[in-house]
Amino acid sequence: MARKQKRLTKKELRQDPLVKTMTETQLWLEKNGKALLIGVFAGVVIFFGINLFRNMQASNEGDAAMAYFEAAALLASNQEEVAIASLDSVAQSYRGQTGGHNALLELAELHLRNGDAELAYESFLQLRNRAGRDRLLKITAMDGMAASLEDLERFDEAAAIYDEIVRYDRNGFAIPLALYKAGRCYSLAGNAGMARQRFERILDEYDGSIVNRDAEREIALLDLAG
């Protein structure tokens, strides 16, 4: 004969840990359930918002790349005036995208090749300001700024920017060439002492770099100039 189970009293039910926990949870939900639902809803909105933003970014990157290639094609087909206007439009319309950066870089280099160093400097400056955390892009822009200043024969200012590249470059790949360019600009500005320091640093710290022989030649020329 089956054993008759003992029926729990109301007092015992209230004291049972599982029943107690369920009761407390129910009371908490009744009190805070609305806030919980709002929190969950907000989390869902944020999640979908982030995904939407990422998709929009990807879409914008694609649009920027296409616009840049179209402008570059105009340049390749010798439609320079139209290409310049198109590159400028892409650079301004897609400031946060790679295509916009490429367009601005192409525009700056085009101005420099055409002998318009002032416009080149302004374009390279814009590129540096837009580079954000992209260290390579920022170094490229600063190098262009300095080259533009060299064309304008503002050698002290150019040298200062090359020195800035030396301080900024954590990886060190740009340092030897930047030191050489800084030394050359200081030499052209008539500051032989500063020029020698840069050339000697190349020989002391970057043995085997591509500019070692150039640095040695510059030091020899400084010695001859006495």
Image: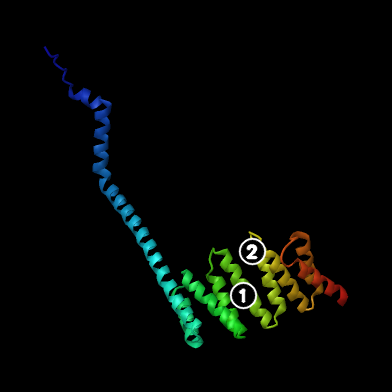
- The residue under label 1 is 144
As displayed, is residue 35 above or below residue 135? above
- The residue under label 2 is 168
Q: Quadrant of residue 55?
A: bottom left
* Residue furthest front in the image: 77
What is the x, y in percent for residue 143? 63, 72
Q: Residue at x 66, y 79 (%)?
A: 149
- Residue 224 as seen in the image, left or right of residue 39: right
Quadrant location, the N terminus = top left
What is the x, y in percent for residue 155? 71, 78
Q: Earlier in the sequence, mark 1 or mark 2?
A: 1
Q: Quadrant of residue 205?
A: bottom right
Viewer-nearest residue: 12 or 143: 143
As displayed, is residue 169 above or below residue 71? above
- Residue 110 as seen in the image, left or right of residue 68: right
Q: CA distance from mark 1 to mark 2?
A: 15 Å
Callout 2 amino acid = Tyr
As displayed, is residue 24 above or below residue 210? above
Label 1: few (<14), some (14–19) or many (≥20) C-alpha neighbours in 10 Å: many
- Residue 73 as seen in the image, left or right of residue 178: left
- Mark 1 lies on a secondary structure that is helix
Callout 1 amino acid = Gly
